[in-house]
C-alpha cells in the first residue's frame, strides 16, 4: 500500500473532514478503510490497480462524469498531468465540494500544494508518511484563467515532426523515445507471423513493425495504461496490418504465443525504480515465444536482462549500444 494512499485518509481521522455520501476517487487505489465509507467510485487507468480496486468490491468507471461533493486524487507523476487533473477535479466538483490530493514529498507534494493554492486561494494540509495531503473547497473565487491553462496543458497533442498523438502522464509524451528509436534502427524487416509489442504505449514500435514488415500477419499491442491504449488505437487506425489492443498487465504473464516480440520494457512503478518489473517483462516475453521465435528489446545499459535471457535458455546477442541504451536480440532456437 502506497504511503500517499495512507496519507490521503488523514484529513478524515485527524483533519476534521467528514465523509460525504458520494465520493469520486481519481487514480483510485484500494484501501481497507474505504469499505466502511458510503459509495466510492473510482477511476483508474492502470490495469493492475483497476483489477485490485474492483476485486476489493469497489465501483470503477472508464470516464468520470457528473458532479461530486468530494473528489479525492492520487495525482500523476508529471507537472502537466497533475495540473490537468486538478482542473479535471474542479470540473467534477459540486459548488462547495472538496478537492483532496495526496503526494509524496519526493514527488513534489509541496510544489503542487502551492500550485493548488495559486488557483484556489486557500489550501489546508497535513503531513505524514513522508507525504503531504492537501485540500481546497470549490468556489467562484478559483482562478478560471489558470484552470483553463491547466486544462490545455493536459490535452492530447502531436509530437512535433510526426503524426503520433500523445498525452502528458504517458511514457515519452513530448518526443520519440531515444531507446525505442535505437531499437527500430536495428530491427530487421523480416519479422513475420504473429508479433507482440509489450508495453506498447501509444504505438510507436507497433507502427514501425506494421509499416516495415510485410510478412507480419497480426500485432498484439499489450499496454497497462488505458489512456495509452486509446491513443494507440488512433495512431494505428490506418495500419496495413491487423492490430489487436490489449489492456493488460504484462508483468502477470501473457495468454498467447508469438513468432516475434518487440519491446522497450518499463522499469519504473510510478516514480520509483522497479527493476523487477522489467525482469518480469523479459521473463514473460521469453515464455511467449514459439520455437524459433525471436525477441527484440532495448533497455538501459545497466539493467541486467541478459541474466534473464540466459535463465530462459534463449540464445542472445548484443546488436547495438550507445551511452545510455543497449539493443538485445534473442531467439528460442529450434530443438
Image: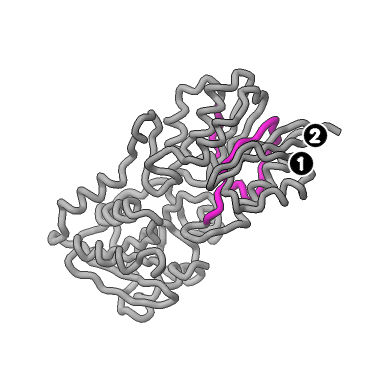
Determine the residue positioned at 36% across, 30% down: 161
**Horizontal and vertical percent position of residue 140:** 13, 59
Residue 39, given in percent of the width and then of the height, sits at: 41, 62
On-image quarter of the C terminus: top right
Residue 194 lies, with reference to residue 7, above or below; the image says above
Mark 1 lies on residue: 314
Outermost residue to the left: 141
Q: Is residue 259 magenta?
A: yes
Question: Residue 45: image x %, image y %?
Answer: 46, 49
Q: Report the residue marked by disc 2.
A: 333
Between 154 and 332, the one lying in front of the other is 332
Can residue 74 be seen by looking at this rendering? Answer: yes
Image location of residue 260, percent across then percent down: 67, 32
Taking the image as shown, residue 279 lies to the left or right of residue 206, namely: right
- 108 left or right of 332 in image: left
Label 2, secondary structure: give it. loop
Identify the element where label 1 is drawn.
Answer: loop
Pointer 1 local density, CA inside 10 Å: few below 14, some 14–19, many at least 20: many
Residue 287: quarter of image: top right
- The reply to whether dot 1 and dot 2 touch (C-beta < 8 Å) is yes
1 or 2: tag closer to the N-terminus: 1
| Label 2: few (<14), some (14–19) or many (≥20) C-alpha neighbours in 10 Å | few
Residue range corresponding to the magenta coloring: 243-268
The colour scheme used to paint the residues is one colour
Name the residue rendered at 66%, 46% in the picture: 282
Amino acid at each position: 500500500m502506497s504511503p500517499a494512499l495512507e496519507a490521503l485518509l488523514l484529513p478524515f481521522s485527524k483533519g476534521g473532514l467528514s465523509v460525504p455520501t458520494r465520493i469520486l476517487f481519481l487514480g483510485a487505489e484500494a484501501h481497507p478503510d474505504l469499505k466502511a465509507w458510503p459509495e466510492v467510485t473510482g477511476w483508474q487507468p492502470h490495469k493492475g490497480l483497476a483489477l485490485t480496486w474492483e476485486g476489493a468490491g469497489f465501483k470503477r468507471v472508464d470516464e468520470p462524469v457528473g458532479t461530486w461533493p468530494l473528489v479525492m486524487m492520487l495525482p500523476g507523476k508529471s507537472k502537466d498531468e497533475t495540473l490537468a487533473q486538478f482542473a479535471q477535479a474542479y470540473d467534477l466538483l459540486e459548488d462547495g465540494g472538496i478537492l483532496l490530493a495526496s503526494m509524496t514529498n519526493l514527488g513534489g507534494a509541496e510544489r503542487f500544494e502551492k500550485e493548488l493554492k495559486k488557483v484556489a486561494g486557500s489550501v489546508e494540509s497535513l503531513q505524514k508518511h513522508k507525504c503531504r495531503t492537501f485540500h481546497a473547497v470549490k468556489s467562484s473565487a478559483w482562478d478560471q484563467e489558470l484552470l483553463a491553462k491547466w486544462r490545455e496543458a493536459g490535452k492530447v497533442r502531436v509530437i512535433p515532426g510526426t503524426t503520433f498523438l500523445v498525452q502528458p502522464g504517458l511514457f515519452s509524451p513530448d518526443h520519440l523515445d531515444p531507446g525505442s528509436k535505437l531499437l527500430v534502427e536495428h530491427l530487421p524487416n523480416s519479422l513475420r507471423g504473429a508479433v507482440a509489442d509489450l508495453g506498447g504505449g501509444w504505438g510507436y514500435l507497433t507502427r514501425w513493425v506494421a509499416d516495415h514488415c510485410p510478412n507480419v500477419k497480426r500485432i498484439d499491442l499489450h499496454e497497462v495504461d488505458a489512456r495509452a491504449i486509446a491513443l494507440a488505437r488512433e495512431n494505428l487506425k490506418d495500419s496495413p496490418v491487423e492490430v489487436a489492443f490489449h489492456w493488460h498487465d504484462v508483468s502477470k504473464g501473457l495468454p498467447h504465443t508469438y513468432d516475434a516480440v518487440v519491446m522497450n520494457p518499463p522499469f519504473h512503478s510510478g516514480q520509483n525504480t522497479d527493476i523487477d518489473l522489467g525482469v518480469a517483462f523479459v521473463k514473460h516475453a521469453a515464455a511467449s515465444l514459439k520455437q524459433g521465435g525471436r525477441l527484440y528489446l532495448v533497455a538501459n545499459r545497466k539493467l541486467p536482462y541478459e541474466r534473464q535471457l540466459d535463465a530462459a535458455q534463449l540464445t542472445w546477442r548484443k546488436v547495438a549500444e550507445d551511452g545510455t541504451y543497449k539493443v538485445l536480440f534473442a531467439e528460442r532456437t529450434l530443438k
